[in-house]
Image (spheres, grey):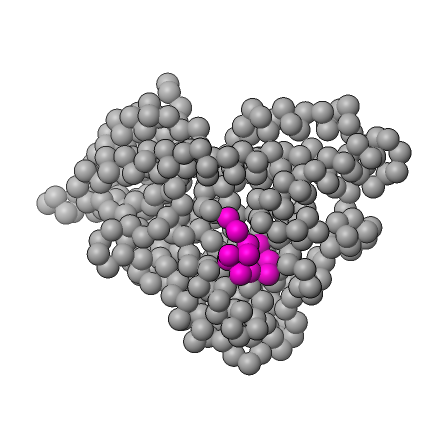
């Protein structure tokens, strides 16, 4: 059976170039980057080179790049490292759980959070962010591209709101990295988080942009690693892999790969929407999709349970998701789709199709062949569909 993976927003496989870049640092160049002998200096040099690549990726100074374990640590660092009792925090109701759960914990430590709701399209209105500002507001955190819908948020405008009010601004760019044009200066943020495994790099490694002078406290204390901003021996193979993935991501934004990816996403989406009782989550008042990450489409299917359709498609060789992988197995519908105004039935009947950069025309052809079959099968078993038909 052919297998087609369309769950790239959950994780991505290593590209061969990334694997080859990492390989020497597991065995030949295994040194600790903090050691002063030759083995250590080889590792230290690799980390320095990787930092230069990430600085180019972010468009910042080398000293503003901090390596860590991934997106969750980056998000947590921005929140726990900046907020103190009595502060006010602004985020949105469609953020990743790394933000939402951190805000929930801070509630018990005297930090109040305002959760700004999106429009029905999934877009956050910067005016709503401005309205939420208080005298004690210290931090705003908004994701670049939503992990479930792919909707790209107006972070430049939100950055201007933050700048005009003197509030720190963090961007969770885990899903936008490598898919959206990147420039922390243009975004106007003080902090930004990415994760390697969402962009064809290894799991367990990520990076943060921390603007010079931002008084963020380290979550981990110990050694003087990362200029005392993140204690712990550097994951040299992972850091090298992240840098290679970032290098390839920059190339993909210039060589037409992202345009090709968006075209294949659009073809897949158009083919699925030919089925009756389907629609896209993330459309504007004009009925057209709002700006989204090039690889992502979130589609609702009437008269079925999304989880059943995920299983049916998997049995036919197509891997998709009902939403965030961090909530797989959850009985509650997507908090993102509910915040956008969908009712529980439609939220539960929605699937996310997220394509790898290596997706082929044949992959899309196969998906368009089996999705109608799976939908028909699941609908035929659905009590809702049966009641409707009778």
Whether 106 is drawn above or below 319: the answer is below
Q: Position of residue 40 (x, y in %)?
A: 83, 34
Quadrant where the image shows the N terminus? top left
Task: Identify the residue at image location x=55%, y=56%.
Answer: 185
Whether 344 is drawn above or below 103: the answer is above
* Residue 109 appears left or right of 271: right
Residue range in magenta is 182-192
Taking the magenta stretch, the answer to whether it contains residue 190 is yes
* Residue 298 appears left or right of 37: left
Residue closest to the far left:
390
Q: Position of residue 14 (x, y in %)?
A: 55, 29
Taking the magenta stretch, the answer to whether it contains residue 53 is no
Q: Position of residue 74 (x, y in %)?
A: 61, 53
Whether 376 is drawn above or below 158: the answer is above
* Residue 389 appears left or right of 352: left
Residue 18 visible (yes or no):
yes
* Residue 43 appears left or right of 390: right
Task: Identify the residue at image location x=17%, y=41%.
Answer: 276
Task: Identify the residue at image location x=21%, y=56%.
Answer: 286
Work out whether residue 138 or residue 47 is closer to the camera in this orientation and state it.
Answer: 47
Residue 31 occupies which quadrant of the picture? top right
Work out whether residue 224 or residue 5 is closer to the camera in this orientation and state it.
Answer: 224
């Amino acid at each position: 059976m052919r297998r087609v993976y369309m769950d790239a927003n959950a994780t991505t496989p290593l590209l061969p170039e990334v694997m080859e870049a990492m390989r020497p640092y597991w065995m030949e160049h295994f040194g600790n980057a903090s050691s002063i002998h030759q083995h250590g200096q080889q590792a230290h040099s690799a980390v320095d080179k990787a930092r230069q690549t990430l600085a180019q990726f972010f468009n910042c100074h080398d000293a503003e790049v901090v390596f860590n374990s991934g997106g969750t640590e980056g998000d947590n660092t921005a929140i726990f490292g900046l907020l103190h009792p009595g502060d006010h925090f602004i985020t949105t109701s469609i953020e990743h759980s790394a933000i939402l759960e951190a805000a929930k914990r801070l509630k018990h430590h005297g930090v109040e959070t305002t959760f700004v709701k999106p429009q029905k399209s999934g877009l956050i209105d910067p005016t709503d962010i401005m309205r939420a500002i208080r005298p004690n507001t210290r931090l705003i955190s908004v994701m670049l591209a939503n992990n479930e819908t792919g909707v790209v948020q107006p972070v430049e405008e939100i950055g201007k709101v933050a700048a005009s009010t003197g509030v720190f601004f963090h961007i969770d760019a885990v899903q936008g990295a490598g898919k959206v044009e990147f420039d922390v200066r243009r975004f106007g943020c003080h902090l930004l988080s990415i994760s390697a495994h969402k962009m064809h790099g290894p799991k367990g490694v990520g990076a943060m942009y921390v603007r010079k002078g931002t008084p963020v406290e380290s979550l981990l204390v110990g050694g003087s690693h990362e200029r005392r901003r993140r204690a712990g021996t550097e994951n040299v193979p992972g850091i090298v892999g992240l840098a290679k993935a970032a290098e390839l991501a920059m190339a993909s934004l210039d060589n037409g790969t992202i345009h090709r990816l968006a075209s294949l996403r659009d073809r897949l989406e158009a083919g699925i929407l030919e089925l009756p009782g389907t629609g896209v989550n993330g459309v504007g008042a004009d009925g057209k999709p709002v700006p989204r990450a090039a690889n992502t489409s979130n589609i609702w299917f009437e008269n079925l349970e999304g989880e059943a359709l995920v299983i049916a498609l998997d049995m036919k060789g197509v891997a998709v998701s009902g939403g965030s992988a961090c909530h797989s197995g959850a009985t509650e519908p997507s908090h993102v789709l509910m915040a956008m105004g969908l009712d529980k039935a439609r939220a539960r009947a929605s699937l996310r199709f997220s394509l790898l950069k290596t997706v082929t025309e044949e992959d899309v052809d196969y998906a368009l062949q089996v999705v109608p079959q799976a939908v028909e099968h699941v609908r035929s078993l659905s009590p809702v569909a049966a009641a409707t038909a009778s």
